[in-house]
Amino acid sequence: MAFTTDYGESNDVFRFLRMDNDGNLRIYSSSGNNGSGNITQTWAAVTDQCQVYGFCGNMGICSYKDSKPVCGCPSQNFEPVNEHDGRKGCKRKVEIEDCPGDVTMLQLEHTMFLTYPPELSDQLVTLAIVACRTNCLASSTCTSSTLVADEVDFVT
């Protein structure tokens, strides 16, 4: 159950629920006749925009600048899909198959990998960090691994 910030204040309030283009579900209120007044956001499903699944697109990293969410790429080996819209995600500058030498893994500390539940138990493997990195680097199909306990993500 969710209550808007203006719940119970007036009977003359028009409310509507909308899934916004940033992926967050919000309730808006408008006072006046038939909702003709100013429209105000009065509730959001997710208060931390960086916690909205997919907000920064594929391989994008969400962080904050002056308390506003901004999207970036995990390293200099990546670039935005659209330089004018960071929410479109990131892409590798050089695809893994085209790398001239060995592939390594980039450790992203203080990051959290958002998944959409439910996780399939057959996709979860318990390994120490070194074994996890080694297994992923040895596999031609592995592009990333996540150490859930310490919230450390790796991207190749």
Image (tube, grey):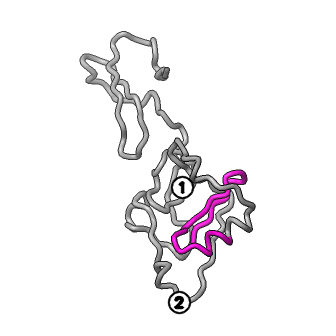
Residue on which disc 1 sits: 62
Question: Residue 33 magenta-drawn?
Answer: no
7 or 93: nearer the eye? Answer: 93
The residue range painted magenta reads 134-156
Q: Is residue 4 left or right of residue 33?
A: right
Give neighbour class at mark 2: few <14, some 14-19, many 20+ (Cα, 10 Å): few
Residue 66 visible in the picture? no
Q: Is residue 134 above or below residue 9?
A: below
- Expressed as whole percent of the image width and height from the top left, the position of residue 60 reads 49, 61
Rendering coords of residue 12 (x, y %): 33, 12
- In the picture, the quarter occupied by the C terminus is bottom right
The amino acid on which the numbered mark 1 sits, given as a three-letter code, is: Cys
The front one of 71 and 128 is: 128
Residue 51 in picture, x, y percent from top left: 54, 45
Whether 137 is among the magenta residues is yes
Image position of 79 with respect to 60: above or below: below
Q: Which residue is mark 2?
A: 100
What type is the residue that disc 2 sits on?
Pro
The residue that appears at 37% across and 66% down in the rendered structure is 82
Which residue is drawn at the image coordinates 49% and 22% (left, top)?
2
> Badge 1, how many Cα within 10 Å: few under 14, some, many 20+?
many
Residue at image location 47% in from the left, 81% down from the top: 97
Measuring 35% from the left and 29% from the top, which residue is drawn there?
17
Does label 1 or label 2 sit earlier along the sequence? 1
- Would you say 128 lies left or right of 30 here? right
The answer to whether residue 95 is left or right of residue 104 is left
Determine which quarter of the picture holds residue 111.
bottom right
Residue 58 appearing in the image = yes
Q: How many marks?
A: 2
